[in-house]
Structure formats: structure tokens, C-alpha cells
Image (cartoon, coloured by chain):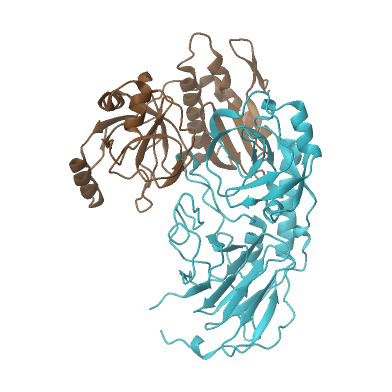
């Protein structure tokens, strides 16, 4: 039996669990978890974790041959997009298969990796640091202190290969994105906006407030596993000066510097 | 030993190495990429005797001249009307229509200029292009700077290595060229089929009606990431922002200005704007052939009908491949030329 596509959130608003993306994509929506009363801050995180957990279950089922026609799985902040091959499976079959799994999704982030990443703040690497200091009524040093003190978690990956949306930036640093995005941001520049941090893995247009740069690659097509970060990783940045930046950059590219992952 | 290669004497403004793409890694931000016109890709590889996973050249906007340093079978696909000109080492030209394969010898060149009736054609080469694969695919994604040659569109003078030619061998009787006898897979309708969603509930009923009843034009702002449409704006209930989520090929994204953008093969993996509808998979190749200024209308169908359309479309494509025949002989062209007589 297929359970209903309609779920009532705690605030009574009706939320559709499954949404179509053509005849080749199915969105599994966890938006209702956002509407739980009294949990306004953390419930997007809950939806993010449910989407990630479901992706894990589907991936496992596909690997075990229990589910065919799964082309790709893209976890979003509040939903999971399942891309499927309509020659091998239908949305209806997919829905029937995964519906029973939805009640048993893990809401914790499970075993997370803890990663420490060096960052050289300010100067030409962080051209917005001084400007946002005025906006936030903090000194540039205070911004850096609060950023390195923030315990971040990779919520989702997207936009570019290896780009991680890291949530958990200190509330005192909340800012919107820049009104006019920059036409080109240099690779490995670190930006902040809202409660999030990103580092651009490669040169790209971008609208985030740029405060520093990291000396290690987030995406290296030459490696067996080209992507450094993944969803669920816990991230801490630590401050380095320009000399340390240059040293680490050199040693990283010589294959000497090892990123701290525990 | 040297590797067989081709040289892009003129690359054209928007030519790239493409194959079936690298789906399966979008969760770490790696775009799917791959040929815009998957029908042209499948037919081209079939005509030159390649497995379906081989890479060839996607040519948007024409302007291409390629010198062959190896003898290979080639086929141009993506249109019923497109042509290429093969020039032999004596300077003799021969015009070859799309949808048939023909052997090109070392020392000969191919010109592909205007693209009749389409925005993109595909040149398949037996063996396939042999640039380094990433995640099992050679597809170029210029924004992500991966795939193809150095992750970019091709430039004049680029040399592209070729994989060993495993295609069907020529026989003593002649070349094992093929041509399509059934071209119905290219049939186009004026209307593109969509399924409403995933965020159609963020638009007014009027906006949904306008979307289906209006004629849109393909904007000149067209690239491998997306096709912007000029026409009536679509009104949101409140605003255009959503919590960032995944995108599929064909997603019709509508940002705050109300102007729809259909996301194509090189789309970013996630986005933060509402998507009113999704173009069905079966109509994506036909959509990719539309040129700036071409008209587009939309018809809404159900998920079940979209899935059925994919199966019907696959059957048409398989039929086109199963019914390939030997083409009539071409006019004489000098071959093989002396430089083909390799000693390595």
C-alpha cells in the first residue's frame, strides 16, 4: 500500500512529500520538518540530514541491486532529488519502494569527519574584510576571531565541483550576499553570507563577502578522490599569516602538507 | 609511437568534446554535462561503429575546420539538412550530408560551416576522442573547468588525441560506411512537453496559464548551461527564493524577474530559484536544436506520460540504429593519400 503523498506539518500546513521533476526526477521533500514549532533555527538542519540519510539508503539499495535505474542523488537543504532513468524505473515504483524508509531516517549526522583548514584572512585575499567590519560594527580581528571560533558543518555541496555550503557561522557575522556579485572571484577564496561559509574551488563569478583564502585545493582532478569535503563534515578554520600561507601552499603542492582529518 | 590525432585548424566559437556525461557525482557539485543533443550523440557513435560511450565533437555555431592525422570513419548528426565538406590532399572537395558515415584519410580536412536548421551538430569519429577522462567521462564542462581539453572550449590549433579505432573494419569489398534509412527520430513538434513542478505551487494560477498559452522566443543568451526565453513574465505568489536544491536537465527555473530559463546539460548541480516545470527527457534533444529567435510553446503532461514518452523515444532511436543501411557510393575522392602510409 502506498501511503499518502500529503503530510501535515506540526503547524497544520499541508506539505507534499513527493514532487515531480519531469519524468526523470523525483523530489522527496522534507520541508515539513521546517515547520515544527519552537525549532525554527535547527529544523532546516533536520531536513538536510533526513535528505542526506535517504540518499545513503537509496545508494545502498542501488549498490545491492535492490533498486535499478538510479542515475544520481542530489541532496538539497530541505529535500532530496532522485534522478532516475525512466527506461528502468518509474516514479511510482520509486515512491512505493522508498516510502516505508521515510519513517526510519536518521536525524543525527552520524559519524562525521572533523577537518581543520588553514586560512589567511584579510589583505588582498579577503578584500571585503575591512568593509564588512564597518557594517557589522566589529573590528577585522574580531571578525576573524569569531570565524575561526565557529563550528561549521557541510550542509550540502553544489554550484561547482567541491564547493561546500558550510553552516554554523557566528550570528554576529550574519550578512546578506553582496548586492552586485563579482564577475570573477579567484580560486580558493573564502566568503561568508547568512549563517554560511563557502570557499570557491575554482575561479568563478560570486556574490559572497570575501574575507580570506586557503592554500589547499578543494577539487583536484588529478587525485583518485578529487573532492576534499563532503556533506556532514565538521569544519574548523584556523588563521595563518601570509608567510605560513606561502609555506603551506608550497608544501601542499609538493605533496607534503597533509590536511588534518579526524 | 605517435598517437593518432586530429588538429582543430579552426575550432569555431563554441565547439567542445562531449560524450554521455558524468552523472553520479552531482552530490559533490560535479555537473552532469555531456552532449546537448543525446540523439545526435547516439546516432553518430552508431554510424561510425563506436560503443555508445565514445566522445566526439559538439559543434554549436559552426565555423570548424579539422585536419586528420589518422584515417578514421566520421559521421555528422543532429540535423537532417547539415553538411560537411571533405577536402583531400589534392584540394578536391566533396560534400557529405549528415546521418551517414564516411572514411576520412590522414592528410584530409573536414569543414563544417553553417548548421542548417539547428543550433548544434555532433561529429562522431571512430575510436572516439581520447582526452583524459574524469569520473569516466570526457565531457567538457567549461564553468567547472573539467573534462575535454583542459576543461575548456576548443581553440584554434588544438590537437586532440584519438582512442584506438575499434570500429567495424573495412572489408576487401570497400568501406563499411552506414547511413540512416529512418529519420523519424528527428521529427520535431512546435510544442515542448513539460511536467509541472517541483515548485509550481509557488506561482499564481495565472502564471501557469500564461506559461502554457504563450509563445516564447529563444533568447540570444544561450549556452550549454541554459536557454533563456523571451516572452511574458511569470508571476510568483510571493518570491522566487527557495532553499537550495538539486536541478535536472530541463528544469524550467524562474528567478525574480519572472523570465524562464531552461537549464541544459552544463547546469549547476543546485540552485536557489523556483522551478515551475521540467522539460521531459524525450524532448530535450529537440529543444537543444532550437536557435536564438526560434519560437517555443509548452504543453503540460503527466509524469506517467513523460515516462512513456521516454520509452517511445528510445524505441524510435533503437529503430533508427537497427535500420542503418549501406549508403550509395560517393563521388570519387583521392584516397588513401600518401601521408596515410604510416611506418610507425
Q: Is residue A106 visible in the rendered structure shown here?
A: no
Numbered marks: total: 0
Residue B201: x and y in percent read: 69, 26
Residue A260 lies left or right of residue A202; in this view the side is left
Vertical side of B3 occupied by A80: above or below: above
Identify the colour of chain B in the image. Answer: cyan
Q: In the image shown, does A135 or A63 lie closer to the viewer?
A: A135
Tell which chain the image draws in brown.
A
Quadrant of residue A95 within the rendered picture: top right
Lateral position of residue B81 relative to residue A143, left or right: right
Quadrant in which residue B99 is drawn: bottom right
Depicted B202 relative to depicted B143: above or below = above
Q: Which residue lies at the image location 22% right of the left edge and 50% below the top edge? A: A250
**On screen, B31 above or below B240?**
below
Residue A77 appears in the figure: yes
Q: Which residue occupies the foreground of this view, A29 or B127?
A: A29
Residue B249, x across and y down, in percent: 61, 45
Q: Residue at x 61, y 79 (%)?
A: B103
The quarter in which the N terminus of chain A is drawn is: top right
Foreground of the two, B276 or B43:
B276
Amino acid at each position: 500500500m502506498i501511503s499518502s503523498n500529503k503530510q501535515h506539518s506540526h503547524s497544520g500546513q499541508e506539505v507534499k512529500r513527493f514532487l515531480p521533476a519531469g519524468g526523470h526526477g523525483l523530489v522527496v521533500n522534507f520541508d515539513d520538518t521546517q515547520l515544527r514549532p519552537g525549532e525554527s533555527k535547527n529544523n532546516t538542519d533536520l531536513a538536510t540530514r533526513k535528505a542526506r540519510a535517504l540518499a545513503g539508503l537509496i545508494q545502498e539499495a542501488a549498490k545491492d541491486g535492490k533498486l535499478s535505474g538510479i542515475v544520481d542523488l542530489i541532496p538539497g537543504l530541505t529535500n532530496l532529488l532522485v534522478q532516475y532513468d525512466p527506461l528502468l524505473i518509474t516514479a511510482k515504483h520509486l515512491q512505493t519502494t522508498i516510502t516505508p524508509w521515510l519513517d526510519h531516517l536518521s536525524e543525527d549526522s552520524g559519524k562525521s569527519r572533523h577537518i581543520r583548514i588553514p586560512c589567511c584572512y584579510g589583505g588582498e585575499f579577503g578584500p571585503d574584510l575591512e568593509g564588512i567590519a564597518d557594517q557589522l560594527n566589529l573590528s577585522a580581528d574580531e571578525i576573524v576571531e569569531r570565524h575561526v571560533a565557529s563550528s561549521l558543518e557541510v550542509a550540502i555541496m553544489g554550484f561547482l565541483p567541491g564547493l561546500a555550503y558550510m553552516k554554523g557561522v557566528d550570528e554576529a557575522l550574519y550578512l546578506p550576499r553582496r548586492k552586485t556579485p563579482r564577475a570573477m572571484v579567484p580560486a580558493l577564496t573564502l566568503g561568508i553570507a547568512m549563517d554560511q561559509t563557502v570557499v570557491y574551488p575554482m575561479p568563478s563569478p560570486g556574490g559572497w563577502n570575501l574575507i580570506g583564502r586557503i592554500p589547499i585545493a578543494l577539487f583536484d582532478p588529478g587525485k583518485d578522490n578529487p573532492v576534499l569535503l563532503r556533506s556532514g563534515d565538521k569544519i574548523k578554520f584556523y588563521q595563518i599569516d601570509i608567510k605560513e600561507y606561502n609555506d603551506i601552499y608550497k608544501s601542499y603542492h609538493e605533496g607534503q602538507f597533509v590536511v588534518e582529518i579526524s | 609511437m605517435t598517437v593518432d590525432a586530429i588538429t582543430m585548424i579552426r575550432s569555431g566559437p563554441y565547439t567542445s568534446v562531449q560524450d554521455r556525461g558524468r552523472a553520479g557525482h552531482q552530490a559533490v557539485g560535479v555537473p552532469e554535462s555531456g552532449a546537448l543533443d543525446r540523439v545526435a550523440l547516439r546516432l553518430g557513435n552508431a554510424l561510425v561503429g563506436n560503443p555508445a560511450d565514445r566522445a566526439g565533437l559538439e559543434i554549436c555555431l559552426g565555423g570548424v575546420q579539422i585536419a586528420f592525422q589518422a584515417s578514421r570513419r566520421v559521421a555528422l548528426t543532429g540535423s537532417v539538412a547539415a553538411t560537411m565538406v571533405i577536402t583531400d590532399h589534392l584540394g578536391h572537395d566533396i560534400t557529405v550530408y549528415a546521418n551517414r558515415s564516411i572514411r576520412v584519410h590522414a592528410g584530409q580536412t573536414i569543414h563544417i560551416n553553417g548548421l542548417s536548421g539547428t543550433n548544434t551538430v555532433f561529429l562522431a569519429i571512430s575510436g572516439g576522442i581520447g582526452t583524459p577522462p574524469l569520473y569516466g567521462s570526457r565531457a567538457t564542462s567549461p564553468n567547472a573547468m573539467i573534462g575535454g581539453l583542459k576543461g575548456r572550449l576548443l581553440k584554434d590549433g588544438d590537437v586532440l588525441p584519438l582512442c584506438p579505432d575499434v570500429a567495424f573494419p573495412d572489408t576487401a569489398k570497400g568501406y563499411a560506411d552506414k547511413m540512416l534509412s529512418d529519420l523519424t527520430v528527428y521529427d520535431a513538434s512546435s510544442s515542448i512537453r513539460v511536467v509541472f513542478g517541483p515548485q509550481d505551487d509557488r506561482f499564481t494560477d495565472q502564471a501557469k496559464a500564461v506559461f502554457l498559452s504563450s509563445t516564447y522566443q529563444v533568447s540570444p543568451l544561450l549556452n550549454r548551461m541554459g536557454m533563456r526565453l523571451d516572452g511574458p513574465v511569470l508571476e510568483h505568489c510571493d518570491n522566487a527564493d527557495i532553499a537550495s536544491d538539486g536541478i535536472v536537465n530541463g528544469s524550467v527555473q524562474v528567478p525574480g524577474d519572472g523570465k524562464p530559463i531552461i537549464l541544459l546539460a552544463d547546469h549547476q548541480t543546485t540552485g536557489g530559484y523556483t522551478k515551475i516545470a521540467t522539460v521531459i527527457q524525450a524532448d530535450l534533444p529537440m529543444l537543444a536544436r532550437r536557435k536564438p529567435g526560434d519560437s517555443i510553446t509548452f504543453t503540460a503532461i503527466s509524469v506517467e506520460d513523460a515516462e512513456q514518452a521516454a520509452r517511445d523515444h528510445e524505441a524510435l532511436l533503437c529503430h533508427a540504429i537497427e535500420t542503418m543501411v549501406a549508403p550509395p557510393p560517393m563521388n570519387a575522392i583521392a584516397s588513401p593519400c600518401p601521408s596515410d602510409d604510416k611506418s610507425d
